[in-house]
Amino acid sequence: TAVGPGSDGQVLTSTGAGSPPAFEALPAGGRDGTPNFFVYLSGDQTISDQTLTKVTWDAEDFDSDSAFASNKFTVPSGEGGVYNFSVYFHTSGVNRYMFCKVYKNGSLFAQNTGFDDNDDATGQTTSLSILMSLSATDYIETYIYTDTSGGGTVALKAANRASFFSGYRVA
């Protein structure tokens, strides 16, 4: 049996074995994944060797609650809860290692390290995915730190959303 379309604010649920599913109102305490956002770089960002650098996310695909501004996500009023964040960095040039860092309210909360054992010029990637319990007005920022072979700079790549930051409320 075909199921007709639901309306805004409904979810598809099971009505039991042998019965067709039905659309029902979102259960109390359920979430629809908002607030949510996906931001990326519109152009490569230059990263200096051995310098902690805030990533300047300047393009977005979506931002459901207009909560992403000035390179950070701020939890809107009444939207505290558990959030899932994902950060992905892709750099060009020679990196011995690179840190992907997530800051909460100006302090380091989590980091991940990528290593380049080959020390070649093909670039490097590292990523971080984390669940965080947040309250209204908490804010999240991302930073990158690289150690290159011989100093200089690397580029945090932008092409085809090669570097991005996203998040959404889970509960």
Image (tube, helix red, strand yellow):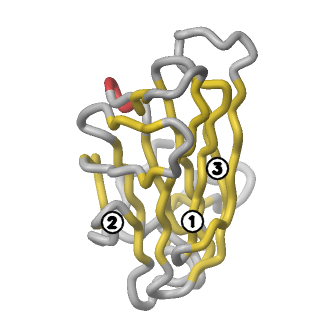
Name the element at disc 3. Answer: strand
Rendered image quadrant of residue 78 = bottom left
Q: Position of residue 153 (x, y in %)?
A: 43, 29
Nearer the observer: mark 1 or 3; the answer is 1
In the image, residue 153 sits, relative to residue 18, either above or below, namely above
The residue carrying mark 2 is 68
Q: Position of residue 71 (x, y in %)?
A: 34, 60
Q: Nearer the viewer, residue 148 or 160?
A: 148
Asked whether the beta carbons under mark 1 and mark 3 sit within 8 Å of each other, the answer is no
Q: Residue at x 41, y 68 (%)?
A: 73
The residue carrying mark 1 is 103
- The quadrant of the rendering that contains the C terminus is bottom right
In the image, residue 99 sits, relative to residue 126, either above or below, namely below
Three-letter amino acid code at the position of disc 1: Tyr
Query: Mark number for residue 129?
Result: 3
Nearer the observer: mark 1 or 2; the answer is 1
Q: Position of residue 3 (x, y in %)?
A: 44, 49
Three-letter amino acid code at the position of disc 3: Ser
Name the element at disc 2. Answer: strand
Q: Residue at x 35, y 49 (%)?
A: 39
Three-letter amino acid code at the position of disc 2: Phe
